[in-house]
Image (cartoon, rainbow, N blue to C red):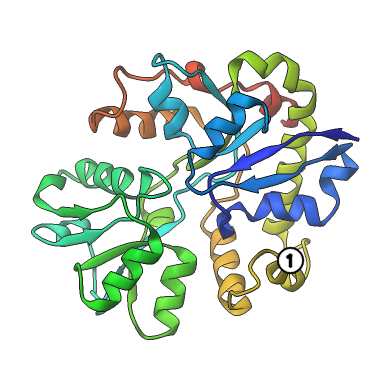
Amino acid sequence: MEILNVSATAHGSNYLPEYVAREHGIFADHGLKVPSQPRSPWDGVMHDLADGTADVALGGLWVPAMYAGNGRDFVAVCQLNDRFPMSIVTREPIAGFELSWFTGKTVLAPGQGGTAPAEFTRGLMREAGLDPWRTRFAHDLSTQMLRELFLGGLGDAFIADLGTATELEHAGQGHIVYRHAERGGRMPNSVYYVLRERLEELTPKLIPFVRSIDRAMGLLRTGEAGDLGSLFSSEWPGADPKVLAEVTAELVENGTWATVRVDRDACDRWTGILHDAGLTSAPVAYESIVDTRAMDAVA
């Protein structure tokens, strides 16, 4: 059994295919043992790659993009999310919500785990012809802290993961008015990436790893993963299983787990948003941050 160590920036429901692959023995069927460790703060994944504690990091594609040509050389080998699985919550329902509603408002955007909630939303606003700087974004703080502040009265809207947003709706404390995965188009949100210097060494293990993730995604899409209750209980013992089941169904439906392949156009769009925001020193080429060998082997 080959070992492939993963260091993850979070432990969220949008990462479910990896947990299914482990729980259902799919990794083992491919000759792999895949230990995974979530890191808080998230940048622990980079330290794990640097010292060899981890072989692979799971997190945002924005990290390889921002480092491209700027020191560390990270390369993505597949994606776990084909969409950005977050949503916008307001205190009252807003019929026909559009991002133009944000003008003059204060939006709480979690940033402790990464830059995507604020930057992808601002990118969508620019694509719609809006000026995001006419909206006040409060970010760089944790989801839990901003949730508490939102419930206490701060801000006009809250960008939240689907689990948090669904909990707020169930409690009558908020209303989901916009789903990025449905309205924001394709976006390689979470990817598996490695140090380029280890790519050749790891590729023989990355190919069965990506095949395993692809298989787990397929089981979730077709419903063949079966009853996930025990997996929910072991991964998120304090969470409401009904909320987790609802979120899982939505992630299947909205295409978040559609494919392990990092789409070139979606990647270029996301890195273009990052460049427009000043977060990359130059436009980032697909080939500079994505290696397709493991994805090609799955295809």
Q: Is residue 287 above or below residue 189?
A: above
Q: Residue at x 24, y 45 (%)?
A: 122
Give residue 9's position: percent from left, percent from top.
53, 45
The residue wearing badge 1 is 231
Q: Quadrant of residue 151?
A: bottom left
Kindly identify the residue that appears in the image at 44 percent across and 49 percent down.
Answer: 84
176 left or right of 213 in image:
left
The residue at 88%/44% (across/down) is 28
Q: Residue furthest bottom?
A: 172
Is 223 situated left or right of 85 in this image? right
Image quadrant where residue 152 sits: bottom left
What is the x, y in percent for residue 266? 44, 34
152 left or right of 18 in image: left
Looking at the image, which residue is at 55% across and 31% down? 47
**Residue 284 appears in the rendering:** yes
Q: Is residue 110 above or below residue 198?
A: below
